[in-house]
Image (cartoon, rainbow, N blue to C red):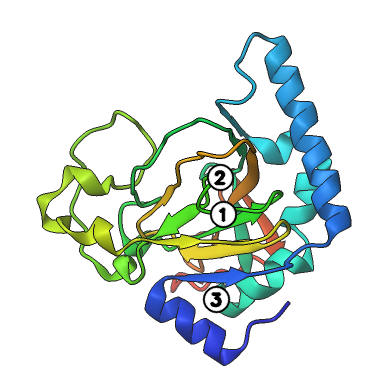
Amino acid sequence: MRLTPAQVNLFRQNGYLKLENAITPESVERLKQSVEAEFIKEEAKGSEKRSMKLYGFFDRSEAFRNLVQSNAITEPLADLLGPNVVFVKNRHNHASINDRGRVERRFHRDILQWSRGLVTAIVYLEAARPDNGCTYVIPGSHNLPFVGVTQIDPPGGGTWLDEHEVFEGVEQQALPVTIGAGGMLLFDATLFHSVGDNNSDESRISLTMGFRSSDELDYAPAPVDVQVRGEHIYRGNDR
């Protein structure tokens, strides 16, 4: 699915873009089965199945690896990031279940500042609505300033909105992103966003990924990077 110029422009202005039916129902079912199988493994180890994220999912699931490298994901990303796209294994790379009864609303960024350059992609394996914990975004908040780091607990690498007085009143501008199973949400990783409260009798399963352009000043790809489209290029002045 290639993006139109209008879609790209909306992403630049608002910081996010919703794409319904990004992956097929068959892919949704395969991925759901993979997620459930991995959660069952974790449950057997004594973990709480429905109250956790499973990180490192790229190395756990063939279905997820196929998704990350598929045209369904990389084509729209190429319109935002250019022809050489990298999957970043140490940012997100997880499956999660927002289960019934959970309350977890806190707005944050996924990275500290714009210079890092990252696009977050969430693929929904079950429909996301306000009642079952859909994602909330604050449009245009990727243009708000970098404010530094004030604490490391909870960790995560980004910025928590409620820690900084300069963002007072911003949370009131949040909007819910309602999206069907198989839909994808792309957003600038400096956009403030949050999972919603799940007040329904249903779960909400999703997969979260981070992507960036190949860094033309890196001699070689980082060990945590996977080239998913195009190639690694080097444009340093020393060659």
- As helix, strand or loop, the secondary structure at mark 1 comes to loop
Q: What mark, if any, has residue 80 been given in the picture?
A: 3
Numbered mark located on residue 103 in the image? none
Alpha carbon separation for disc pair 1 and 2? 5 Å
Circle 2 or circle 3, nearest the eye: 2
Q: Residue furthest right?
A: 26
Q: Is residue 61 visible?
A: no
Helix, strand or loop status at disc 3: helix
Residue closest to the far bottom: 5
Residue under numbered circle 2: 132
Residue 101 position, x and y percent, is 51, 30
Q: Position of residue 36 (x, y in %)?
A: 76, 31
Q: Which disc is residue 129 wearing?
A: 1
Residue sitting at x 65%, y 74%: 76
Q: Secondary structure at mark 2?
A: loop
Q: Distance of mark 2 from mark 3, alpha carbons? A: 30 Å
Determine whether 47 is above or below 218 in the image. above
| Residue depicted at 63% across the width and 35% down the height | 56
Vertical position of residue 44 compared to residue 128: above or below:
above
Which amino acid type corresponds to the residue marked 2 in the rendered image?
Asn
Mark 1 is on which residue type?
Arg
Query: Which of the two discs, 1 and 3, labels the residue nearer the N terminus?
Result: 3
